[in-house]
Image: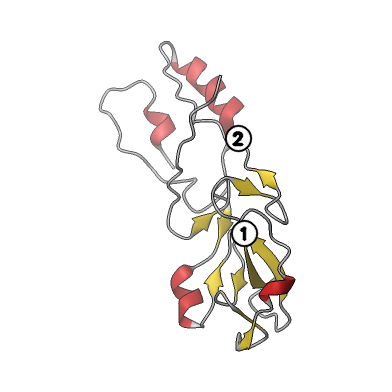
């Protein structure tokens, strides 16, 4: 049975298969760089070097399955780049050599019962959340709903 693929919509500046890599696209553009899927900065496509002004040697690009080589900087302060592969849809791995893992759809839990049951559920799910700036967002409360505590910061 073939599973359905779902296109994930990431929150602003978050990327990666788990939406846990951060890169500020506007900042990257201002300094003449791009963001990679790793959440790091890189030279624009076709360029490398500390100032991103040296043409990239495409014939040395080891990427498979139409992946693109980019010159990545490990930290924003780096002046030495390294070549990595930016994989297109459907592939992953250092050289885009692997078929992309089909990440499961989100689990929706509907609960009926006491607030004690809900507290146990919260405790069991607590370790499964992605730790990013969106983790503590509050949601609109539903007046009189027994699980209003879940919607607090």
Q: Is label 2 in a helix, a strand or a loop?
A: helix
**Mark carried by residue 67:** 1
Q: Which residue is mark 2?
A: 128
The local crowd at label 1, few if under 14, some if 14 to 19, many if 20 or more residues have their Cα within 10 Å, is: many
| Viewer-closest of 64 and 140 | 64
| Viewer-closest of 153 and 92 | 92
**Position of residue 147 measured from the top left corner of the image (x, y, whole percent):** 39, 24
Please indicate whether residue 17 sits to the left or right of residue 50 in the image.
left
Question: Residue furthest toward the front?
Answer: 59
Image point 54% across, 22% down: which residue? 121
Image point 30% across, 33% down: which residue? 141
Q: Is residue 72 above or below residue 94?
A: below
| Mark 1–mark 2 CB contact (< 8 Å) | no
Instruction: Residue 86: name its quadrant.
Output: bottom right
Please indicate whether residue 1 sits to the left or right of residue 134 in the image.
right
Distance (Cα) linking label 1 and label 2: 31 Å
**Position of residue 108 measured from the top left corner of the image (x, y, whole percent):** 45, 24
Q: Quadrant of the N terminus?
A: top right
**Mark carried by residue 140:** none
User: Going from the N terminus, do you reach mark 1 or mark 2 first?
Assistant: 1
């Amino acid at each position: 049975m073939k599973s359905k693929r779902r296109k994930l919509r990431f929150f602003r500046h978050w990327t990666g298969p788990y939406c846990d890599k951060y890169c500020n696209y506007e900042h990257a553009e201002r300094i003449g760089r791009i963001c990679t899927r790793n959440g790091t900065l890189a030279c624009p496509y076709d360029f490398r070097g500390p100032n991103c002004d040296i043409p990239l040697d495409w014939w040395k690009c080891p990427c498979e399955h139409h992946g693109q080589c980019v010159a990545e900087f490990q930290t924003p302060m780096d002046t030495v780049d390294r070549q990595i592969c930016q994989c297109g849809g459907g592939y992953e791995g250092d050289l885009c050599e692997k078929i992309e893992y089909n990440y499961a759809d989100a689990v929706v839990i509907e609960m009926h019962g006491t607030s004690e049951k809900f507290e146990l559920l919260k405790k069991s799910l607590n370790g499964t959340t992605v730790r990013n700036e969106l983790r503590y967002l509050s949601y609109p409360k539903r007046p009189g709903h027994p699980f209003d505590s879940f919607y607090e910061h």
